[in-house]
Image (cartoon, rainbow, N blue to C red):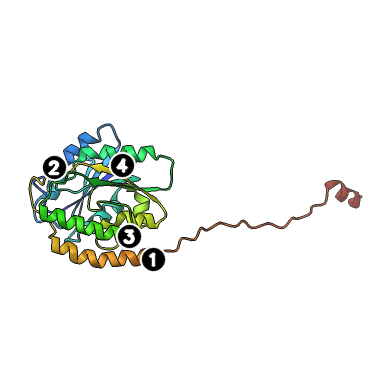
């Protein structure tokens, strides 16, 4: 007997994770609570972890899914894998370290709902307030955001926030490259779509360690910024219109005339 296929959920929560076994299960439970009553799934992308991050997800309920990379690909690669595997038309992303409180997800959904029916909205981006990071990390982040904002004019104060919401098809229409997740507002605007911003809370890391140093961010950020600037300058957005063929008119002879000739 064939089993009926489960309908696709409305929302897919995509979480890139690397060695987050200590925090992942609690985070997913908090997402369940935050989205109670909604139709959703959670897709955790285990980006080559050396601990049992994936096992914690597999031990959970059926709507907790896990995609596993055979080696580390980075955050953008993990997000891309998660979005490709996602079944929902609407994607929510957040970091696995617990610093993006999942209780803030309804704020993104509320903003999206207010724009329902407006096809031009392509991204709802969270912006962290009262960040719980080290002073050095805060200074580095502010400097990077200032340089990026001046170069791209993307109107975004904080692109490093993992809390974001966007349609799946919009994300898949973006050019893919490593570290693209840091430039989503500019890339979405490049498609001619609007970006909405929402202030969200930020929490201190409870376990594990940061996966990037300030120097690593600065080095790759400089190259990526130049690449995104090039993409924006090279973008052309013609507006295609489908033309309809005009079929030739075929004159037909009335039946009465044909009958007269037969007689």
Mark nearer the viewer, 4 or 1: 1
Query: Regarding mark 2 in the picture, which secondary structure is present there?
Result: helix
Residue at 8% over, 45% down: 206
Which of the labelled discs sits on residue 25, or is there none? 2
**For marks 4 and 2 on the same chain, the one whose residue lies earlier in the sequence:** 4
Residue sitting nearer the eye, 175 or 57: 175
Q: How far apart in space, not on screen, are marks 4 and 1 (Cα)?
A: 33 Å
Residue at 9% over, 56% down: 50
Mark nearer the viewer, 2 or 3: 3
**For marks 1 and 2 on the same chain, the one whose residue lies earlier in the sequence:** 2
Q: How far apart in space, not on screen, are marks 1 and 2 (Cα)?
A: 43 Å
Residue at 40% over, 67% down: 234
Q: Is residue 247 above or below residue 1?
A: below
**Picture coordinates of residue 104, whole percent (x, y):** 23, 39
Name the image quarter holding the N terminus: top left
Crowdedness of circle 4 by 10 Å Cα count: few (<14), some, many (20+)?
Answer: many
Mark nearer the viewer, 4 or 3: 3
**Picture coordinates of residue 71, whole percent (x, y):** 16, 61
Q: How far apart in space, not on screen, are marks 4 and 3 (Cα)?
A: 30 Å
Name the residue carrying label 4. 11
Residue at 27% over, 37% down: 106
Name the residue carrying label 1. 233
Residue sitting nearer the eye, 211 or 125: 125
Taking the image as shown, residue 181 lies to the left or right of residue 174, namely left
Kindly check if marks 3 and 1 are in contact, taking CB atoms under 8 A apart as contact.
no
Residue sitting nearer the eye, 71 or 158: 158
Name the residue carrying label 3. 152
**For marks 4 and 1 on the same chain, the one whose residue lies earlier in the sequence:** 4
Query: Regarding mark 1 in the picture, which secondary structure is present there?
Result: helix
Query: Regarding mark 4 in the picture, which secondary structure is present there?
Result: strand
Kindly check if marks 4 and 3 are in contact, taking CB atoms under 8 A apart as contact.
no
């Amino acid at each position: 007997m064939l089993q009926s296929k489960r309908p696709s959920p409305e929302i897919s929560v995509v979480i890139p994770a690397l060695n987050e076994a200590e925090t992942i299960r609690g985070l997913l439970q908090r997402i369940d609570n935050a989205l109670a009553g909604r139709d959703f799934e959670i897709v955790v992308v285990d980006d080559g972890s050396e601990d049992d991050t994936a096992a914690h997800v597999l031990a959970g309920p059926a709507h907790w899914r896990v995609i596993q990379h055979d080696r580390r690909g980075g955050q953008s690669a993990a997000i891309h894998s998660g979005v490709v595997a996602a079944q929902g038309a609407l994607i929510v992303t957040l970091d696995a370290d617990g610093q993006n409180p999942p209780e803030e997800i309804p704020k993104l959904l509320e903003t999206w709902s207010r724009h329902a029916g407006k096809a031009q909205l392509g991204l709802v981006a969270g912006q962290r307030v009262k960040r719980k990071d080290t002073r050095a990390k805060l200074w580095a982040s502010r400097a990077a955001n200032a340089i990026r904002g001046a170069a791209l004019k993307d109107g975004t104060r904080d692109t490093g926030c993992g809390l974001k919401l966007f349609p799946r098809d919009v994300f898949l229409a973006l050019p893919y490259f490593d570290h693209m997740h840091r430039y989503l507002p500019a890339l979405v605007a490049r498609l001619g779509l609007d970006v909405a911003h929402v202030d969200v809370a930020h929490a201190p890391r409870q376990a594990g360690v940061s996966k990037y140093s300030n120097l690593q961010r600065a080095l790759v950020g400089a190259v990526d910024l130049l690449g995104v600037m090039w993409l924006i300058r090279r973008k052309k957005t013609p507006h295609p219109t489908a033309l309809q063929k005009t079929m030739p008119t075929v004159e037909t002879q009335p039946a009465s005339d044909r009958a007269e000739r037969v007689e």
